[in-house]
Image (cartoon, rainbow, N blue to C red):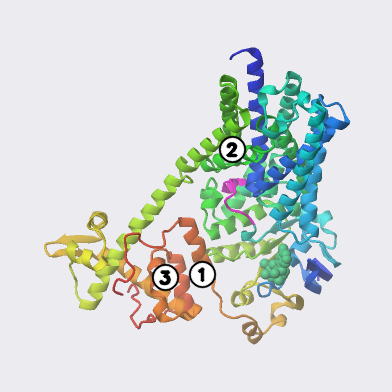
Amino acid sequence: MLDPIFIKVLLGTLLLAASSSVVGAFSFLKGESLVGDAIAHALLPGVVLAFILGDGRNPLFLIFGALVAGLIAHYGISFLEQRTKLKGDTAISLVLSTFFGFGIMLLSAVQRTGLGQQAGLERFLLGKAAAITLSDLYVFAALAVVLLVSVAVFFKGFQLMTFNEDFAAAIGLPVQAIRFVFTILTVLAVTVGIQSVGIVLMAALLITPAAAARAWTSSLRLMLVLSAVFAATAALVGTVVSASLPKMPTGPWIVLALGGIAFISLLFAPEKGWIARRKRAKGNQLKTQRENLLKLLYGAEEREGETVAMTSETIVAMRRQHLDGLRKTLRSLKKEYLLVERPDGFALTDKGRTEGRRVVRLHRLWELYLTERLGMAADHIHPQAETMEHIITPEIEALIVKELGNPELDPHQSPIPYEED
Amino acid sequence: MEKSIEVHNLTVSYHSKPVLWDVDFKLPKGKIIGVVGPNGSGKTTMLKTVMGLMKPDSGYTEIFGQPLDKVRERVSYVPQRESVDWDFPADVMDVVLMGRYRKNNLFKRITKEDRRIATEALEKVNLLEFADRQISQLSGGQQQRVFIARSLAQQADIYLMDEPFVGVDAATEDAILKLLRDMKNEGKTVVIVHHDLQTANEYFDWIVLLNTRLVAAGPKEEVFTKELLQEAYGGRLTVLSKLGDLISDTEFPLREPDFKEDHPKE
Ligand SMILES: Nc1ncnc2c1ncn2[C@@H]1O[C@H](COP(=O)(O)OP(=O)(O)O)[C@@H](O)[C@H]1O
Ligand SMILES: [Mg+2]
């Protein structure tokens, strides 16, 4: 397995995958994930025509064919979007299917002559890194290096074009030229990429590593590096599996490995991962429960006109909340001295009362805002305010108070309790 | 009067539907100028056309008496904050440094001098301590100040800003305004797109009142009367859009999960 040919194929595949994923990262950030897919499909007729018209064994010739077809497809999509009423993805699908259909037609014609088999044209469909000849490999590896170097050289341009194209144009950057370079790089990236994963799975190679990388970092440079590392790792898995097991295709394994990496990233990444977000949502949930409890006690005090203590049983009955959840909420409030536990139950401290008053105030302010500004009926606003009272920041509160002119009563004629200072 | 911007018989359309009709005015130098009009009145379109981002159907625009290409380095543009995706992987410093990008340094590394200028700009908008912060984690007001810092880093003579006060809290609004006045005192020209009439009168020296056609342009005292302003603009609902942002930013659950709807109203 560690014979020199395998090592060369492996290195080649790693480079192919890494370089196309770095270019793909910009497509991902631009939200143009589908364009890469369309270009990949559109390359097929170019490649097959290059084979028919010229020397089918020469990889440079195939690349040239791919480049021409890719560019025609890319500008075809732009043309359709600008000149017709077609929506973006309709234009993309149209170009994709037309080109691909044409390519398949040509491919079957060539295959009938028997020449296609010899040239290994079918490898473009599903990718077959192991079948790449050494001379192919040198060409594609060189191309991969060109891609990586170009991205490094054009980094500032690509960064600004992706983030804020209007600004790029406003400071006089040659946006047309930069966009053209990016298009060429995309087509080349797809051309090298399909050597390893094939046309059908190419979009995954462009986009998935970037999506996974984005979950881990918020630095563009680091994101590009991580995309390359993820793509190379997946390429390693794919190549090794297909070399060790009989009849195992490389491309699908690469894409499967990528899917695994993306899945892990989206699940476990700090901050952006699903689990981290769940945790944050849980934190917000605790905040909501705490504030609702303080509000409950504040409301009771408001009715009674004096300090009120409630046992956890009373609270459970009033809030119809599970006792377990309530205990946790009570503990956290006690720890921060918002509640005290007395023999007759839990009561607000001064600090807790201020907090409870704030929640009640926000609730009533929001109800008033809904009726006054949005014309909602007074009996429809309560559920909305239940949520908003936990979200409104002091900044927004001030804005509402100002806009409503320091109101005193809510739509149900309850007083809006301000802090007296 | 020394001219900063001239807009000459300008007509601009989207898909052959004109959104600016034969607009014609000249602006002075060294003033804070408001381009004012309700939503959809073509303010952004006008600014984009002046910046060469849209081709007019007819007419032309000039800055300091010359076509834009001749004076580009003296012009700074602040797009509408919502026009970019703030989830883009970049920190505050990255964005401010973009103000130092030029055609002739596109392939060069960022220099120490660039960093110094960017740092200074961040200091002016009071965001230096946020230099390493991810832009996605900023509040609306902070994002707006990042855009202004980027614009300051360009060290231009005229600044065109699209709605810099939208989504900004009162303290930030004051800070931005003070900054603009300092810039004016240094002899810079500041053109602000603005849709809030309450404040327009107070903020600007000179006003262009736009509503697809040019309604009026001149010193603010001449251009409009209070009655007219209140007639043109109704109540506003800025609170709503702010809350929308906040909810999506903080992933707030819309309800407590184990909480039943119809509990007694407090
Ligand atoms: N990309 C676009 N395509 C089509 N119509 C647009 C586009 N952008 C703006 N418009 C229309 O042009 C008009 C002016 O828009 P705009 O210049 O953004 O106004 P303002 O900045 O004053 O709110 C509006 O009616 C808007 O709907
Ligand atoms: Mg606008």
Residue B23, compared with residue B146, is above or below; it is below
Main secondary structure type of the part rendered in magenta: loop
**Numbered disc 3: what chain?**
A
Mark 2 Cβ and ligand 1 under 8 Å apart? no
**Is A140 on the left-hand or right-hand side of A303?**
right
First in sequence: mark 3 vs mark 2? 2
Q: Which residues are magenta?
A: B84-94
**Disc 2 residue type?**
Pro
Q: Residue at x 43, y 65 (%)?
A: A392
Q: Quadrant of ligand 2?
A: bottom right
Point out the image quarter for the N terminus of chain A: top right
**Disc 1 residue type?**
Leu
Can you give x and y, in whole percent of width and height, for residue B47 in the image?
74, 64
Q: Is residue B88 magenta?
A: yes
Between label 2 and label 1, give the one nearer the viewer: 2
Would you name the residue on which mark 2 appears? A209
Quadrant for residue A270, please give it. Answer: top left
Q: Is residue B20 magenta?
A: no
Mark 1, secondary structure of its residue: helix
Q: Is residue A208 visible?
A: yes
Q: Which mark is residue B229?
A: none
Residue A378, compared with residue A153, is above or below; it is below
Can you give x and y, in whole percent of width and height, for residue B223 in the image?
72, 81
Q: Is residue B155 visible?
A: no
Q: Nearer the viewer, residue A89 or B106?
A: A89
**Is A41 on the left-hand or right-hand side of A345?**
right
Are callouts 2 and 1 both on one chain?
A: no
Q: Which mark is residue B240?
A: 1
Would you name the residue on which mark 3 appears? A384
Task: Residue at the far bottom: name it.
Answer: B227
